[in-house]
Amino acid sequence: MFVSEQRRPLNRASVWHMIKAVAREAGLSDVHPHTLRHSTGYNLVNRGTDLRLIQSFMGLAQAGSAVAVLARRIDITERGQLQPALEKVEETLGPVNILVNNAGIVALGGILDQEQEDWDRVIETNLNACFLLSKLAARSMVRQRLGKIINIASEYSLFGSGLVAAYSASKGALVQLTKSMAIELAPFNIQVNAIAPGWIDTDMIAPVKTMPLYQEVIAPTPAGRFGSPAEFAGTAVYLASAASDFVTGATLFVDGGYAIR
């Protein structure tokens, strides 16, 4: 997701509604993009493959939202689509100020049984596309000497897993990429950070509540529950706002304490 701003510096109050939409794009179903209607001074771009979400975003423009909205369906593993996508953003809405890299996929399997094609697909989506989109967006941000890049990592950025080896590798590498980009881009007033969400109560993980795995997750979580979509969104708001201008290279775990045990 790209956000462009043409009239004033990044502002937490103004960006709040947009980042709630970012959270919904990541699968956080009770954060609705119609909250964007009261935001001013920013433009929003959704780049994804979820047709329902794209239609929701386009509905904002049709409803006369104060926020300019651009939504396109692209495949981020098709590298040739990335630069034209960013060029279309800047042509339509102006320079990009915020990039949220939140596309991600999982393929089950370890080193003994995972197909090479599955490994390549996960790494291309979760890591390579983040690098390439950040590279393109950063060029625009450098010219402005203003920008925020937010990468969506994972608990598996910290922990290993014999069941999702490619996913763990991609998310661990994304955290290291976040640190490296933060060092390189800091002189240009660009902050690069990551969010590592824990178990967030979404439609995607709803089936877990009926499985033995649910208690296995809850037991070591000090908070004793799953997080809510709004709790995840608040962290993105912070990292996209001027309140985090002295924060860069960090990975914030939003997990109710799961990672500390």
Image: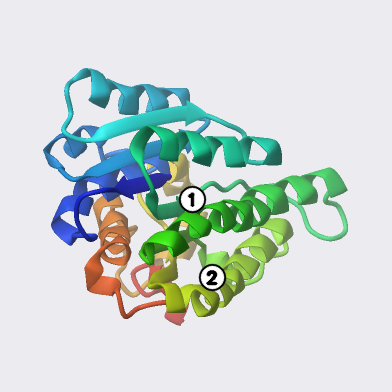
Residue under the image location 18 percent in, 20 percent down = 63
Residue under the image location 86 percent in, 49 percent down = 116
Q: CA distance from mark 1 to mark 2?
A: 13 Å
Q: Residues within 10 Å of mark 2 (few under 14, many from 20)?
A: many
Element class at badge 2 = helix
Q: Which mark is residue 102?
A: 1
Residue 158 seen in the figure: no
How many numbered markers are drawn? 2
Q: Residues within 10 Å of mark 1 (few under 14, many from 20)?
A: many
Give the residue type that dot 1 points to: Asn
Where 31 sits versus 174, above or below?
Answer: above
Q: Which mark is residue 164?
A: none
Tell me the colour scheme of the image. Answer: rainbow
Image coordinates for residue 50, horizontal then vertical, percent: 48, 29
- In the picture of the structure, the residue carrying the numbered disc 2 is 178
Give the residue type that dot 2 points to: Thr
